[in-house]
Amino acid sequence: MELALTHESYSNEHAEEYGDNERLEFLGDSVLGMIVALYLYTHHPRVSEGVMTQVKGFVASTAYLADRARALKLGGYLRMGKGELLSHGGDKANVLADAMEAVIGAIYLDGGFEPAQRFVSEMLKAAMDNLEGSQRDYKTTLQETCQKFFHILPVYQVVGETGPSHHRFFAIQVSLDGQVLGNGEGHTKQSAGQEAAQKALELLRWQLGYDFDVRNHITGDEAQT
């Protein structure tokens, strides 16, 4: 774990014999991809290969891994050189994402596949279950539902925005013809909007007595159009 949290800049300045976290990052990237692919294949049997590829790309992206690293306050544990510290390297997306992959690699080497699988699955479960990053999702399902039953489209509005510019936290509200259907929060407008749409669908399911399943809209060839 110490190696996983050692940035190249620290190793260069202190002449560390065992190097930095770049090799662990390489390993962790492959382990991460395998775990995400296995989770999606196992837990979402009706989802197409195209959608699984999109979701995998989203949760393994630099931006999303950096967001998860910030949630764990990983930047505060990184060993970095003076120059990197002065440039706030502990909050740079690429540095954090690389460190997260290195940590996954370290867990895999230390305990094997199952501990790494538990760590990654718990960290990314919400995003993978929401199929974030796919072309068809809760927002698309809500839009089609509103068109089908009410012949109008839902309206999304940012009702709150907090935190520093590099780590914003958004609150989004979705309404239909002036009636609030759901609220969502997240570190991106996309994730906050997804949560708001999901809650709106839950409300409409109760009001209309209609069982919506977002996965019905993300299967087969339709998901790749």
Image (cartoon, rainbow, N blue to C red):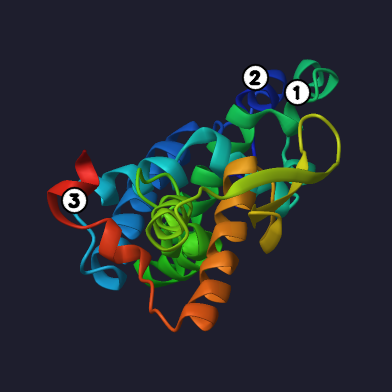
Residue drawn where x is 54% and y is 50% of the image: 103
* SS at badge 2: helix
Discs 3/2, front: 3
Residue kind at label 1, given as amino acid type: Gly
**Residue 193, horizontal then vertical, whole percent:** 60, 50
Task: Look at label 3 and name its amino acid.
Answer: Glu
Residue 197 versus residue 189 in the image, above or below: below
For image coordinates 42% across by 46% down, the residue present is 28
> In the image, what residue type sits under mark 2?
Asn
Residue 148 relative to residue 2: left or right: left
Task: Identify the disc placed on residue 12.
Answer: 2
Q: In the figure, 188 relative to 83: above or below? A: below
Tell me the CA gap for discs 3 and 2. Answer: 42 Å
What residue is at 47 percent from the left and 79 percent from the top?
208
SS of the residue under disc 3: helix
Distance from the alpha carbon under mark 3 to that under mark 1: 42 Å
In front of the other: label 3 or label 1? 3
Label located before the other in sequence (1 or 2):
2
Name the element at disc 1: loop
Which numbered tag is attached to residue 81?
1
Most foreground residue, 118 or 204 = 204
Locate the C terminus and report the quarter of the image it occupies: top left
Read off the residue under disc 3.
49
Percent x, y of residue 190: 57, 43
The percent coordinates of residue 122 (x first, y second) are 52, 68
